[in-house]
Amino acid sequence: MQHLTEIISAIADFLWGWPLLIMLLGTHLFLTFRLAFIQKYIHQGIKLSVRPEKASTGDISPFSALATSLAATIGTGNIVGVATAISMGGPGAVFWMWITGIFGIATKYTEGLLAMHYRVKNEDGSYSGGPMYVIEHGMRCKWLAVLFALSTILASFAIGSSIQANSLSAALNYGFGVSPLYCSIIVTILSAAVILGGIKSISNVCRALVPFMGTFYIIGCLTLLVIGYDNLGNTLKLIIDSAFNPSAAGGAFAGLTIIMTARYGVARGLFSNESGLGSAPIIAASAQSSTPVKQAIISATGTFWDTVVMCALTGIVIVNTGAWESGNEGMTITKDAFSQIPFVGGEFLCIALVTFTFSTILGWYIYAEKCIQYLFGDKGIKPYRVIYLVSVFLGGILSLELVWSMGDIFNGLMALPNLISLIALSGVASWLTKKYKSDFCS
């Protein structure tokens, strides 16, 4: 088993090496310029996300679609991923992660736009869309669409369910001493209660949960920044200086190069916001919208909230509290930072992580269910639900080192076909943007 884990890990490291990172970042930059820096309209997307849509078709409200995609996106990457980037790449990684989020907005916009444009209406009146439909109907490449759908389903058992349930159990055990077995039973029952209600049930829960968990976590970060406000100016200066001169961080980071620092920041940023992965547009295609560009710009705000705001706050907190200098790694660094909140720091982080991981379980289920529907029709949904809930239960009680690496592989196999379609159909995205551009401000 150890040998198998090493092989799978090596494949994951190769797949998520420089070629894919360059392809992702290159797509971000290409689409940014192809769409004339669509990021400048992000404030309009925020306004549209909370404005009721009239004379529209779709299954759920624009805000519900955004909340569901954020539920799947905001997770361990915002807590563990940021800490890992800093522990490996130094404080400067925070800056590169933030830059990745800025340019990733263009990719998330394009994904949502094409998903809305190529979505299909089902026999029951509901809508389905996402990269599998974009690739099949836009590129006329069925096998590549099938590869994306299969990869999404397999990724849901790793990144979507098992790993999230494992992180949730670990958080409750750390914060409140709850047994992993009891955690698994409870989270499986709660997941089943929501999932069995279908997409509208999941979107309703996410619509209520995401604003709460986001606000809750931001309050925690701001509390830590207020506590250490005297050092905030030096922290921001260190982050910027270290982004271009890693040796400015000193200590164990003195030997880093700017390429190494940028790599860790970019990689964690891409992993956190999922721009280019192709997951978020699956739920965006179900949104009620009168024109494709409206939901596309709303969907793009997901990357803004996830990386430009949430990841940046986490990174600044970790550097400002000095937790990054502890020599620890990953989750332990974030624990060290939040422990500086008097009396309730550990419990605060535990609650944040529990809400993040539970919402991710729900969001990823929707992604995979739509792919099941694409490949096998409605008849495949019930068996998939059972298997997904079993993976949630097992994830809470098993060691998942191997599953992490397998999840990375399947995520990579999702990204590749999706990125190809984004580049190939960028002309369509540009045409739609010009045609409906006035809708950004309507």
Image (cartoon, rainbow, N blue to C red):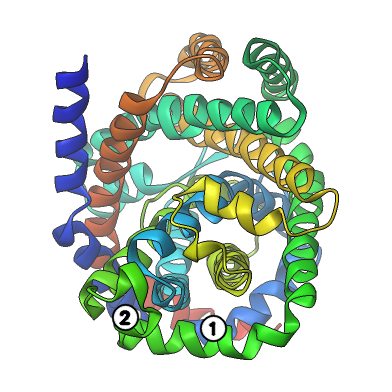
Considering only order in the chain, which callout, 2 or 1, is on the residue closer to the N terminus?
A: 2
Does residue 125 appear in the picture of this structure? no
Mark number displayed over residue 437: 1
How far across and down, in percent of the image, does residue 54 sit? 78, 63
Residue 246: mark: 2
Secondary structure category for the residue under label 1: helix
Q: Residues within 10 Å of mark 1 (few under 14, many from 20)?
A: few
Describe the element under mark 2 as helix, strand or loop.
helix
Q: Please state, as top left, top right, bottom left or bottom right, where the C terminus lies in the image.
A: bottom right
Observer able to see residue 129: yes
Looking at the image, which residue is at 46% across and 71% down? Answer: 101
Would you place residue 3 above or below residue 325 in this image? above
State how many labels appear. Answer: 2
In the image: residue 140, left or right of residue 250: left
Q: Residues within 10 Å of mark 2 (few under 14, many from 20)?
A: many
Q: Which corner quadrant of the image does residue 145 belong to?
A: top left
Residue 126 or residue 328, whichever sits in front = 328
Q: Nearer the viewer, residue 312 or 434?
A: 312
- Looking at the image, is 434 positioned above or below residue 293? below
Q: In the image, what residue occupies the spot 60% across and 79% down?
A: 42
Marks 1/2: CA–CA distance: 41 Å
- The three-letter amino acid code for the residue at tag 1 is Lys
